Amino acid sequence: MTKRIIVAITGASGAIYGIRTLEILRSLDAETHLIISDAALRTMEQETGRTPGEIATRAAYSYDPDEIGAPIASGSFPFDGMLVAPCSIKTLSAIANSYAADLIARAADVCLKEGHPLVLLVRESPLHVGHLRLMTQAAEAGAVICPPIPVFYGRPQTVAEIVDASVGRALARMGIDNDAYPRWTGIDDPGGEKSSKG
């Protein structure tokens, strides 16, 4: 059965995480529903050299963040989970406080209330206690806090491999099998290996 996944790209640095999420999900024949925040529109082209319109073509469906009447704003719309990549502190705060002022926060809130996986690739450093409290609050509501931290046991050679490892691991945490990330195979194989499919 085809997976139906909501992908949100917010204004934190790291738009490439959302882009690669879309690309990997497309390679897995998943149906993606994309929301790009207004802040992400301003940072995406500068970071990646790609336009929001170009990125939207990688998704099956895309929505404006103010499109509160979109299908994904309702718990009656069947879907399998949501990934926010990257997740800004502003978006984290909205999700943690159930402040559904835009479609990203509303779709995330629907995810939580309906018991679907919600994975947040929070991008901020260093973290002050307010950030940490928001993460705890979101986690207590059911979200998975999954900062995109490099996996060095896989011995990445490129930035693309580092990005893929974070995205692949986040998707695996949602229950989506993929071969984008290295898996630890024990101390005798410190380089790790990709999934058995790789």
Image (cartoon, grey):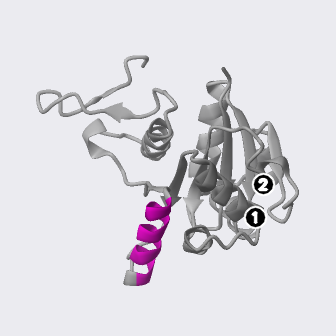
Label placed on residue 13: none
Compared with 55, 15 (above or below) is below
Rendering coords of residue 193 (x, y %): 30, 26
Rendering coords of residue 101 (x, y %): 75, 72
Decide whether residue 165 is among the magenta residues: no
Q: Nearer the viewer, mark 1 or mark 2?
A: 2
Horizontal relation, residue 156 to residue 108: left or right: left
**Which of pointers 1 and 2 lies earlier in the amino acid sequence?**
1
Asked which quadrant contains residue 20, the reply is top right
Q: Residue at x 30, y 37 (%)?
A: 154
Q: Nearer the viewer, residue 142 or 165?
A: 142
Q: Residue at x 54, y 45 (%)?
A: 117
Report how far apart the C-alphas of labels 1 and 2 lie in the structure.
Answer: 21 Å
Q: Residues within 10 Å of mark 2 (few under 14, many from 20)?
A: many
Specify the amino acid type for callout 1.
Leu
Q: Nearer the viewer, residue 39 or 90?
A: 90
Q: Secondary structure at mark 1?
A: helix
Residue range (magenta): 130-141
Would residue 142 be seen by someone viewing this image from the given angle? yes
Compared with 46, 99 (above or below) is below
Q: Which part of the image, by quadrant, shows the C terminus?
A: top left
Compared with 45, 136 (above or below) is below
Residue marked by disc 1: 41
Asked which quadrant contains residue 67, the reply is bottom right
Q: Residue at x 35, y 33 (%)?
A: 182
Horizontal relation, residue 193 to residue 10: left or right: left
Rendering coords of residue 170 (x, y %): 47, 44
Q: Nearer the viewer, residue 57 or 80?
A: 80
Name the magenta segment's main secondary structure. helix
Q: Residue furthest left?
A: 188
Residue marked by disc 2: 73
Q: Secondary structure at mark 2?
A: helix
